[in-house]
Amino acid sequence: MGFAAPSLKGRALRLLSGREYSRLELERKLATFEEEPGSLAAALDDLQAKGFISEQRVLESVVNRRAPKLGATRIKQELQAKGLAPEAVAQAVSELRTTELPRARDVWRKKFGQAPADAAQRAKQMRFLASRGFGGDTIARVVAGGDDD
């Protein structure tokens, strides 16, 4: 007698035991295992109703994990890719923007620690912060070395 493949709900729970996933992420990961149309949606509806899938927890997890290293723009992209509600993403990004300058300074200090000696170094530092998703005004203030919050 062969061993039965795990159910869609079982697969989803196994994924969720490792970290928080949004419903959209679970749909993408489990779509290939759906044998009966609608069974994946039903399984995810059940898990969502029981609190196993929570967009709020996914949002908080991403923000807490990524905020020390990334700017609001990059975090917004990650949240949108997870298929979270636009209002929730906008609220999180708004809150992140209030701490953008000190977070950018911390990232800059860890990477460079000193003001650029010439235009080439300045451009390199600015590109680095931009690649991390920090805004232009914030980048200019950090690289200029102004500590005027």
Image (cartoon, rainbow, N blue to C red):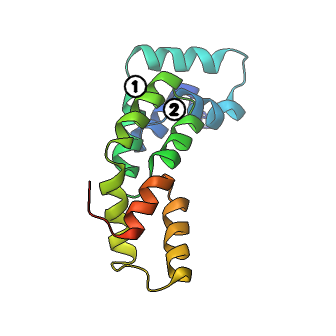
From the top left corner, tell me how far across and down residue 148 is, in percent.
26, 58
Residue, disc 1: 52
From the top left corner, tell me how far across and down residue 127 is, in percent.
55, 67
Q: CA distance from mark 1 to mark 2?
A: 9 Å
Rendered position, 8 above or below 100: above
Tell me the quadrant of the picture where the N terminus can be found.
Answer: top right
Rendered position, 70 above or below 124: above
**What SS does tag 2 mark?**
helix
**Residue at 64% over, 17% down:** 39
From the top left corner, tell me how far across and down residue 48 is, in percent.
45, 18
**What SS does tag 1 mark?**
loop
Numbered label attached to residue 113 = none
**Residue at 46% over, 38% down:** 14
**Residue at 41% over, 69% down:** 143
- The reply to whether the C-beta atoms of the residues labelled 1 and 2 are less than 8 Å apart is yes
Is any atom of residue 70 visible in this view?
A: no
Work out which residue is located at the far left of the displayed protein and give it. Answer: 148
Residue, disc 2: 12
Q: Nearer the viewer, mark 1 or mark 2?
A: 1
| Quarter occupied by residue 35 | top right
From the top left corner, tell me how far across and down residue 115 is, in percent.
37, 79
Sort mark 2 into few (<14), some (14-19) or many (20+) by Cα contacts within 10 Å.
many
- Identified by mark 2, the residue type is Ala
